[in-house]
Amino acid sequence: MHSTAFQTLADPTRFRIVEVLLGGEHAVNDIVRKVDIDQSGVSRHLRILQEAGFARVRPDGPKRLYSLRPEPFRELGAWAMRYRNLWEGRLDKFGEELGRRQKARVAMRKERIS
Amino acid sequence: MTQKGPDALTGKIRIERTYNASIEDVWELWTTKEGIESWWGPGGFVVKVRKLDLRPGGEMLYAMIAVEPAQVQFMKNAGMPLTTETQLTYTEVVAKKLIAYTHLADFIPGVEPYNVATSVEFHAGKQSVQIVLTLDAMHDEEWTRRAVMGMESQLGKLTKILAGPDRE
C-alpha cells in the first residue's frame, strides 16, 4: 500500500487529471486543455502523481506522454475490497440475527396460545 | 447491492441491503448492547460492548475477542492479542433513520489513530427495511492526512484477519 495514495487522490485537481488519464495516454497540452488549469499547475500535479507512483511518462519526439500505472489502483482496490468483505460478512450476520429474533417471537406467541 | 463509482478511485464504499423486518427490530440490533453483540463481530470473534453512548459526540467502546480455535491460533501465530479494544464516536443519530460515526483505529503502538467515516441510513418500508451503508476514507484533507498515517496498519490487520483460515 502506498501510504500517500489517498492523499494523492484527495486533491480535486489531481483527481480530475487522473480521470483524464483513465481515457488513455495524454500529452501535457491535452491535459491542460481538458482540465482547464494552466500548464505549470498541471505539470506540478503530474510530478506529484508520478512521485506517488500513479503516473508514468515517456518521451515521444518533442512531446512527453503521460499515462497511469495500474499498481496503486490495484492496491486501493484491495483496500476497498477488504472493507467491503468485512461489511458484507457483518451484514449477513445481521440478517441471520434478525431472522432468529423473528422466529423466537413466533415460537413464543405459539406457546402462549397453546 | 449497488455501488456508485469504483471504490478504488473514490475511497468510498457503498452497500445496500434490504431486510424483511420491522424498523424496531433493526434499530434495536444497531443501538443496544445485546443487539450489537449478537452480530457485530467477524466470524470466529465475539464482541463485548463496554460502553454505549448513542448521541452525537458519544462513544461506543467494544472489545473484539477471538474465540473459535482457528481464529485463536491465527491471532497467536500472527503475534496479535486475542482481544482488541476498539472505539467509535457517533457523529449523527436520528432515531430509526440514521446513525453516523467515525471509527477510530488506534491498535498499533506508535501509529497515530485515524478515522473512517461511516454512515448508516435506515429506510423503513411497509414490511422491510433498507439499509444503506457508506464508508468514506477520503472525507476531507485533514481526514485524509490522518487516514494516511494509519492506513497501512489498518490494512495489515484487516488483511491478516480476512486471510484467516475460514475467511478466504
Image (cartoon, helix red, strand yellow):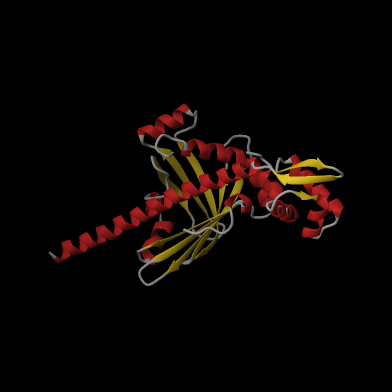
Q: Is residue B96 visible?
A: no
User: Which residue extends farthest left?
Assistant: A114
User: Which residue extends farthest front?
Assistant: A61
Is residue B144 toward the left or the right of residue B102 in the image?
right
Q: Which quadrant does the C terminus of chain A fall into?
A: bottom left
Residue at position x 59%, y 38% in the image: B153
From the top left corner, tell me how far across and down residue B135 is, in percent. 55, 54
In the image shown, does A2 or B62 lie closer to the viewer?
A: A2
Give the number of marks. Answer: 0
Residue at position x 15%, y 66% in the image: A113
In the image shown, does B131 or A67 lie closer to the viewer?
A: A67
Is residue B63 toward the left or the right of residue A63 in the image?
left
Q: Is residue A37 above or below residue A44?
A: below
Is residue A33 toward the left or the right of residue A12 in the image?
right
Q: Is residue B51 visible?
A: yes
Residue at position x 63%, y 51% in the image: B9
Residue at position x 45%, y 67% in the image: B123
